[in-house]
Amino acid sequence: LVYGHAAKSLKEEADHKDNAYWYQAVRANEVYQILDGKQRKVTLCDTSRGEHGNKTIELTGKKTGLDSICVGDMSGDQKGHVRKVLGDLLAPFRRKVSAEALKLVEAGGFDNIHMAFYQKEKLERMKSGMWQLEGPNMICYFRGKPHVYAWMHLRKSV
């Protein structure tokens, strides 16, 4: 699944005025803000995977060894914020579809999801305009530059 929006033009300003999905990046950056210094170092990666067609969101099935911070290593309130990010990603879809997608994520273990922010691809006023959530059976790769778009892949557990 790929979705995106360019509200005014293909090259949007840093605030992404009127962009339908920008709230998702704002919520993800709230997670970064509540991480402690050590966690921030772990979750901050240099550059993203880039875009390579379907390979952009190819799933590895891994629970460990993924870039950045594991949700299982977060505190309860931090996990709650990651859940809100996941809810935001699924919010544009019908409730039934969102519920089914969340079951797939949970089947792979919510605590096995890793969250990465890419510091070399940051936007003004935010630590990162590009970030991803990745677990054994889900990935969301979110880009906020030059406009908002995201790639998402969910599957049943392997």
Image: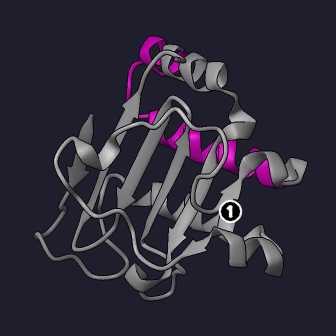
Horizontal arrangement in the rendering, residue 45 relative to residue 143 (left or right): right
Residue 67 picture quarter: bottom right
Q: Is the magenta stretch mostly helix, strand or loop?
A: helix
The residue at 46%/58% (across/down) is 23
Is 131 contained in the magenta span?
Answer: no
Instruction: Spot the residue most to the right.
Output: 75
As helix, strand or loop, the secondary structure at mark 1 comes to helix
Horizontal arrangement in the rendering, residue 19 relative to residue 44 (left or right): left
Q: In this view, does 94 lie above or below 38?
A: above
Q: In this view, does 66 lie above or below 130?
A: above
Residues in magenta, as a range: 78-99
Front residue (pair 61, 33): 61
Front residue (pair 79, 57): 57
Give the crowd class for mark 1: few <14, some 14-19, many >=20 residues within 10 Å: some
The residue at 69%/39% (across/down) is 112
Task: Give percent across and percent down for residue 158.
Answer: 52, 17
Task: Give percent across and percent down for residue 122.
Answer: 43, 82
Q: Look at mark 1 in the image and give the residue it sits on.
A: 31
The residue at 81%/77% (across/down) is 38
Question: Identity of the amino acid at label 1?
Answer: Val
Task: Give percent across and percent down for residue 83.
Answer: 67, 41
Q: The N terminus appears in which quarter of the rendering? A: top left
Front residue (pair 158, 33): 158
Is 80 contained in the magenta span?
Answer: yes
